[in-house]
Image (cartoon, rainbow, N blue to C red):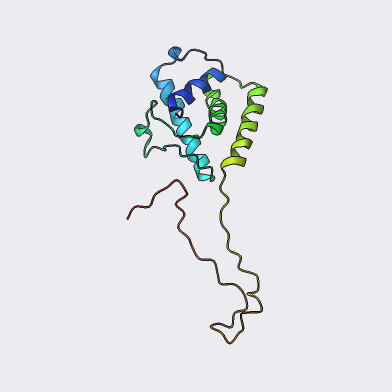
Amino acid sequence: MSWTKREFVNQAFEEIGFAYGYDLDPDQLQSALSKLDGMMAQWNGKGIRLSYPLPSSPTNSTLDQETEVPDYANEAIYLNLALRIAPGFGKVPARELKQFAKQAYNVLLSRSTIPSERQITDLPKGAGNKPWRLTDDPFLDPVTDTLDAGPDSELEF
């Protein structure tokens, strides 16, 4: 069973010194949820795909939604979220928190970043490609534009 968005937010608040979730009002929880969604959208844009359910608008996100994030990513998410929300609550993150967040993020990068595919264009085609066949160009064909949907995305027609 994966963590809910509320669990990430509560854990992040605990990391910055708010040990009890009932001390927070709904506006503070919603603000932290917006920062969580924004951080996960930024990571998704960087190629870190974690199956996190990104909302179509800020009002469509709910705290009790399951995230389906793999277990190895949980610590990186709540520690980095704690760094993002701390200044808004007048907290200065501890140096250890910053170190742990960086270490967890590095583990996350090593496990889940998907390298982008590249097409080599400036290499010769090779000895088997004679100029009297189809083309006189001795180099590989130019890059073709591909459709980037990501491994966790679906295409709808």
Query: Residue at image x 56%, y 33%?
Result: 72
Total numbered badges shown on the rendered structure: 0
Q: Which residue is the extreme one toward the left? A: 157
Quarter of the image for the C terminus: give it: bottom left
Residue 39 location, x and y as percent?
50, 35
Query: Residue at image x 62%, y 83%?
Result: 130
* Residue 20 to residue 146: above or below: above
Instruction: Using residue 53 as the reference point, say whether residue 139 is left or right of it.
Output: right
Quarter of the image for the N terminus: give it: top left
Instruction: Using residue 133 as the reference point, say whether residue 65 is left or right of it.
Output: left
Residue 19 location, x and y as percent?
52, 13
Classify residue 122 by image quadrant: bottom right
Residue 136 location, x and y as percent?
59, 83
Instruction: Using residue 6 as the reference point, say whether residue 18 is left or right of it.
Output: right
Judging depth in this view, the residue of 146 and 107 nearest the camera is 107
Residue 31 location, x and y as percent?
44, 26
Judging depth in this view, the residue of 133 and 101 nearest the camera is 133
Q: Which residue is the extreme one toward the front? A: 1
Query: Residue at image x 40%, y 26%?
Result: 63
